[in-house]
């Protein structure tokens, strides 16, 4: 019954209102089709495009899994194969159909895991149907083939995720009904537990960054992807390395291939953690001296995120700083870089904010990066005084200035 809890909580959330001149697809739109194609949609949504042809072929077969379980439930309800267990069989069928109907009729967003309530009764009903046909050799061979094929696909998926260090996910394909996927081939990257542990070990152990500086002096979209567990792994690694002296290092956590090699040539050696690369460096940007302007008279310190409390999960959202106004500017002083080093700075916002622009004083050269989650950037002139970032803030958000030390 646990999967029913988020369904009940979802009933309290108001449905989105249609924007002027447009329409928001209702939560029931496309839901029947998504339910019937549940298994291939989930496998598609949790794997990268370009799967082996054998896996894609099996996804076509899996398209009949929901229909088969529903047919077995209807057959068991109307014609239970064993009269001495008719009541138990009908009860199981009613449980399956009731849980299935609850998700189908839910007047809010529905997700694939809401149907976890149907897994056990569905398996029982398919087993009952197969047992009634067990003397037929074709049924036995068919069941054996399905078990072998599903096991092979599951092993392939587990080994692929373990080898890559992350699980790809397209949430639009994991939702039942509602808007269609805007980018069907796009995938978010969910780092594995092994990747999170290794990143935490590198940051706290090899680079000796203490706990109170991790959320201020570690940057990059890779760190945002790792920091999704209320600081559990980071706190544990920091506790194990608490005897190490603070060497004043900062760190960049990015995905392999996010930035050109010459942009990173002046940073520390790369330390690999699954798909992520951790590089230590001496920061040239004075984050502690950053000031927010445009929110009234004078300048105020930059809102900083506090280390998350490991037991304060709330509704699962991250705790981010609040801002004093809707369109602030953040000025950060810049120290002189090492000789022959070119500083490049990218501004990215986590949360309810957008980066409107970034520049330096004196003006630098604007940059763009194709790395996911990376905002606009600037290549700093030889003797920069400060970097200025303009934001549009709609709620709690964290400004992340990604600092790259490289060459031309």
Image (tube, helix red, strand yellow):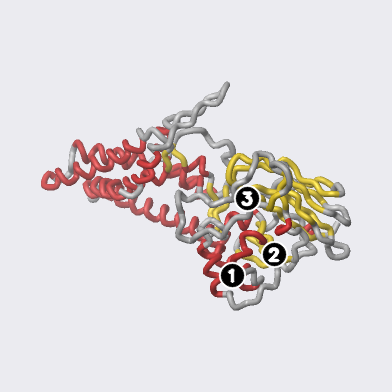
For this view, does 219 lie left or right of residue 156?
A: right
The image's mark for residue 233 is none
Q: CA distance from mark 3 to mark 2?
A: 17 Å
- SS assignment at label 1: helix
Q: Residues within 10 Å of mark 3 (few under 14, many from 20)?
A: many
Label 3–label 2 contact, CB within 8 A: no
- SS assignment at label 2: strand
What is the residue that sits farthest to the front in this orientation?
297
What is the residue that sits farthest to the top in this orientation?
21
**Foreground tag (2 vs 1):** 2
Q: Is residue 136 visible?
A: no
**Mark 3 = which residue?**
398
The location of residue 325, given as percent across then percent down, is: 65, 41
Q: CA distance from mark 1 to mark 3?
A: 24 Å
Q: Nearer the viewer, residue 357 or 29?
A: 357
**For marks 2 and 1 on the same chain, the one whose residue lies earlier in the sequence:** 1
**Mark 1 = which residue?**
201
Q: Residues within 10 Å of mark 2 (few under 14, many from 20)?
A: many
Q: Residue at x 42, y 39 (%)?
A: 110
- SS assignment at label 3: strand
The image's mark for residue 250 is 2
Q: Residue at x 70, y 46 (%)?
A: 375
Q: Residue at x 40, y 39 (%)?
A: 10
Q: CA distance from mark 2 to mark 1?
A: 14 Å
The location of residue 40, given as percent across then percent down, is: 45, 43
How many numbered marks appear?
Answer: 3
Quadrant (top left, top right, bottom left, bottom right) of the C terminus = bottom right
């Amino acid at each position: 019954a646990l999967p029913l809890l988020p369904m009940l909580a979802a009933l309290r959330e108001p449905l989105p209102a249609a924007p002027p001149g447009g329409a928001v697809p209702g939560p029931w739109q496309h839901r029947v089709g998504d339910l019937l194609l549940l298994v291939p949609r989930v496998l598609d949504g949790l794997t990268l495009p370009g799967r082996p042809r054998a896996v894609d072929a099996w996804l076509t077969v899996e398209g009949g899994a929901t229909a088969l379980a529903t047919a077995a439930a209807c057959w068991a309800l109307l014609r239970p194969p064993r009269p001495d267990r008719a009541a138990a069989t009908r009860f199981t069928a009613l449980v399956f159909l009731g849980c299935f109907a609850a998700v189908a009729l839910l007047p809010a967003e529905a997700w694939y895991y809401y149907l976890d309530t149907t897994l056990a009764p569905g398996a029982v009903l398919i087993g009952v149907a197969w047992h009634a046909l067990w003397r037929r050799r074709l049924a036995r061979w068919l069941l054996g083939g399905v078990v072998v094929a599903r096991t092979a696909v599951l092993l392939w998926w587990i080994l692929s995720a373990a080898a890559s260090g992350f699980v790809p996910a397209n949430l639009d394909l994991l939702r039942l009904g509602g808007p269609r996927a805007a980018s069907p081939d796009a995938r978010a990257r969910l780092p594995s537990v092994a990747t999170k542990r290794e990143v935490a070990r590198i940051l706290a152990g090899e680079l000796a960054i203490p706990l109170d500086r991790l959320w201020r002096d570690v940057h990059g979209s890779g760190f945002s992807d790792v920091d999704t567990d209320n600081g559990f792994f980071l706190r544990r690694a920091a506790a194990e390395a608490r005897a190490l002296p603070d060497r004043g290092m900062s760190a960049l956590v990015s995905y392999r291939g996010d930035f050109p090699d010459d942009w990173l040539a002046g940073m520390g050696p790369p330390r690999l953690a699954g798909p992520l690369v951790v590089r230590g460096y001496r920061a040239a940007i004075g984050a502690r001296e950053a000031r927010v302007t445009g929110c009234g008279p004078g300048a105020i310190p930059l809102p900083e995120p506090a280390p998350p409390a490991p037991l304060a999960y709330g509704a699962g959202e991250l705790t981010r700083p609040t801002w004093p106004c809707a369109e602030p500017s953040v000025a950060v002083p810049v120290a002189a870089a090492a000789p022959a080093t070119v500083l490049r700075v990218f501004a990215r916002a986590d949360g309810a904010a957008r980066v409107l622009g970034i520049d330096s004083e004196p003006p630098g050269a604007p940059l763009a990066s194709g790395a996911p989650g990376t905002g606009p950037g600037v290549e700093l002139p030889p003797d920069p005084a400060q970097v200025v970032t303009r934001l549009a803030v709609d709620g709690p958000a964290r400004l992340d200035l990604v600092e790259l030390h490289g060459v031309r």
